[in-house]
Amino acid sequence: MVRSQVETSSHEGLSIGGYALIYVVLLVLTVATFLLSRHDFGIWSTVIALAIAVAKASLVALFFMQLWEHGGTYRLAVATALLWLALMIVFILADVKTRFPLAVPSNAPMADQPVHGGPGTGKPGPTQRQTPP
Amino acid sequence: MSPEPEVAEHFANAQVQRNAVRLGMWAFLGTEILLFAGLFAGYAEYRSLYPEAFFYCSRHLDATLAMIETAVLITGSFAVVLAHHYAGERRGGLTSLSLLAAVATGGAFLALHGVEYVTHFHEGALPGRYYTLAEIPIAGSSMFFTLYFLMTGLHSLHVIAGAGVLAWLALRAARGPITEHKYNAVELGGLYWHLVDLIWIFLFPLLYLI
């Protein structure tokens, strides 16, 4: 039966030498990012550290996890996850970075201010206007 | 009881079965990335709100130790790649040994990280209102350590789970010949271990090197 036959050996991925080379590159990049972080490059420090992290992650994903060889639908699964990750971070940062204190005119409490009082708290709610003394 | 067939009935051949199990694993890894995504997004938010606190707290962590931890995890990934290679050649003994080496790196990583945790507990570099580190009395520092413990803690749980899976695979590889099922299991367990490594590759610069 052809169906139940399985090749006894399946050479997938790189040779041991190839993997060893990638392993050494990963170690070198790890030491490099550590040494570079001891110097202050201002805003570029984070960029450099993340660029090295992306390079290391790419090596692991493409060769250790064999995405380079397998490709196709697996890459789609990864790309989808990364897209959601990016959306989440970008929109949360966009929100945080564009916040501003709401303007409050004179003594009039505004209905859209955070509510600390209201029914059952014994304090006036946001809709109950307080008359200035 | 008859032995489990090498290829399940509904797959045309072993290659199709391999593609299917792999895709299932990648879909699962996608959800794992999303699990950590929330924490990475939280990190981005609080770091943008308290850049100074994050800078000083990051400098307070032991980056040298973290670099060694990174190297240990990468070594574990390399061991798993070797295990996958040997499983492909149907060499059970070497597969098992490589997997056990990876488990050992997981143990070493957890031990090193435990050293860090103990230090932080003693000096009061703790999350939220338990933060009492007098050295850095800046607002936002407690948030750094909240995220530090959540991110590294969740990651360490994954290391424990991954090491458990690899130990089980090592046992299976040592017993009897490497079948198609065992080969696939080594590949999938390996993918999980690599993901744990991938997450750490980002945690290392974000927490220790900024």
Image (spheres, coloured by chain):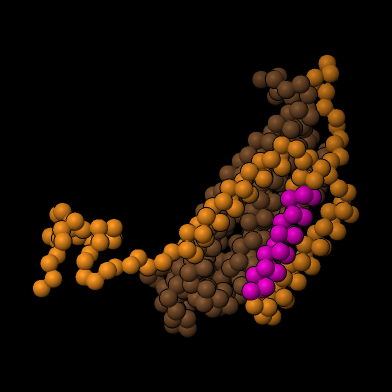
In the rendered structure, the answer to whether residue B164 lies left or right of residue B81 reads left
Question: Which residue sits furthest left?
Answer: A133
Residue A37: % across, % down:
68, 75
- Side of B59 where B23 appears, left or right: right
Direction front: furthest residue: A105
Q: Can residue B22 be seen at all in this image of the molecule?
A: no
Q: Residue at x 51, y 59 (%)?
A: A94
Up-down relation of residue A11 to residue B149 (above or below): above
In magenta segment, residue A59: yes
Q: Quadrant of the C terminus of chain B?
A: bottom right
Residue lying at 82% horizontally and 63% vertically, measured from the top left = A24
Measured as percent of width and height from the top left, residue B163 is found at 64, 51
- Asked which quadrant contains residue B59, the reply is bottom right
The answer to whether residue B201 is visible is yes
Residue closest to the eye, A116 or A33: A116
| Colour-to-chain, orange | A
**Quarter of image, res B90:** top right
Q: Is residue B72 left or right of residue A4?
A: left
Numbered circles on residues, count: 0
In the rendered image of this protein, does residue A65 appear above or below residue A102? above
Q: Residue at x 43, y 64 (%)?
A: A99
Residue situated in front as seen by the camera: A81 or B108? A81
Q: Residue at x 76, y 71 (%)?
A: A32
Residue segment shown in magenta:
A43-63
Please indicate whether residue B204 sits to the left or right of residue A25 in the image: left
Q: Residue B180 at what x, y percent from top left?
A: 77, 32
Q: Which chain is represented by brown in the image? A: B
- The residue sitting at the bottom extreme is B135
Q: Is residue B57 above or below residue B30?
A: below
